[in-house]
Image: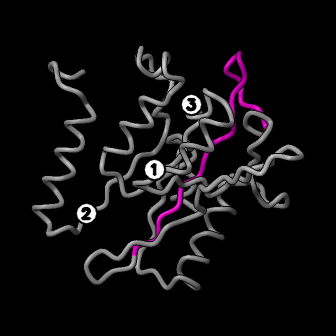
Amino acid sequence: YMNGRSPYALLRAHADRRRIETGGRVLFFDAGDDLEKGALADYTSSGEATVHLLDYLGLDARTIGNHDFAYGVPSVIRQAKSPTHPLLASNLRYLPPPGDNQTFDARRYVVFEVGCARIGVFGLLINGYDETDERVDAPYLGAFAQEHDAESTDRFVSTANALVRELRDEQKVDAVIAVNHLGTFRDRMLIEQ
């Protein structure tokens, strides 16, 4: 809470105010790590309380973060089925076990019409971390693998470049926004490339 008020309510009110002030020409994103932040409601509901709040936040899109895998595969699958906003996981692919017919409805990108502009948005996710806080190059929960060009020296740069080309060439967007969950260092690398 911030000064006795829910940060979710404050964020929603700010987004609503900006939408009114701009005639709807504003986009509202979340870059992930919404779960496992210490709230009792989050822990006791295995993240469902937080996911429910996110559905009422008024987001246009949300990128999944590494902490959003905290409550297992079913939770991640449910997060991707939000009725109010798409979940971005541009470099993630679901590897269902045999007999699993669940679908992972996350998107590689979304395109918004804002005024007279077409805006393409994608979101990349960093590698997972183990219990000693070391980065690992293995699928999240053994079920969500990162897609990348094996020949590339930096998987995130090559994936971002491919997404930008696809959005510009095939979707004919005027601008591209990356709502990544990579960390400042990786984001700066992407900007420089």
Q: Position of residue 18 (x, y in %)?
A: 16, 56
Magenta region, main secondary structure: loop
The amino acid type, in three-letter code, at marker 1 is Arg
Mark before the other along the chain sequence, 1 or 3: 1
Mark 1 neighbour class, 10 Å CA radius: few under 14, some 14 to 19, many 20 or more: many
Numbered range of the magenta stretch: 119-138
Which color scheme did the rendering employ for the protein? Answer: one colour
Q: In the rendered structure, does residue 132 fall within the stretch colored magenta?
A: yes
User: Which of 135/16 is in front?
Assistant: 16
Q: Quadrant of residue 112?
A: bottom left
The residue indicated by pointer 1 is: 62
Q: In which quarter of the image is the N terminus?
A: top left
| Left or right: where 43 falls relative to 106 | left
| Left or right: where 179 falls relative to 20 | right
> Which disc, if any, is residue 26?
2
> Which disc, if any, is residue 67?
3
| Left or right: where 132 falls relative to 81 | right
In this view, 182 is above or below 69: below
Measure the alpha-carbon separation of dots 1 and 2: 15 Å
Q: What element carries label 2?
A: loop
Mark 2 neighbour class, 10 Å CA radius: few under 14, some 14 to 19, many 20 or more: some
The amino acid type, in three-letter code, at marker 3 is His
Measure the alpha-carbon separation of dots 3 and 2: 27 Å
Query: What residue sits 42% from the left and 29% below the top?
Result: 49
Q: Quadrant of the C terminus?
A: bottom right
Q: Is mark 3 on a helix, strand or loop?
A: helix
The amino acid type, in three-letter code, at marker 2 is Val
User: Which of 115/47 is in front?
Assistant: 47
| Left or right: where 71 falls relative to 116 | right
Q: Where is residue 118 in the image (x, y as percent from the top left)?
A: 39, 79
Q: Where is residue 79 in the image (x, y as percent from the top left)?
A: 54, 43
Query: What residue sits 73% from the left and 37% below the top?
Result: 140
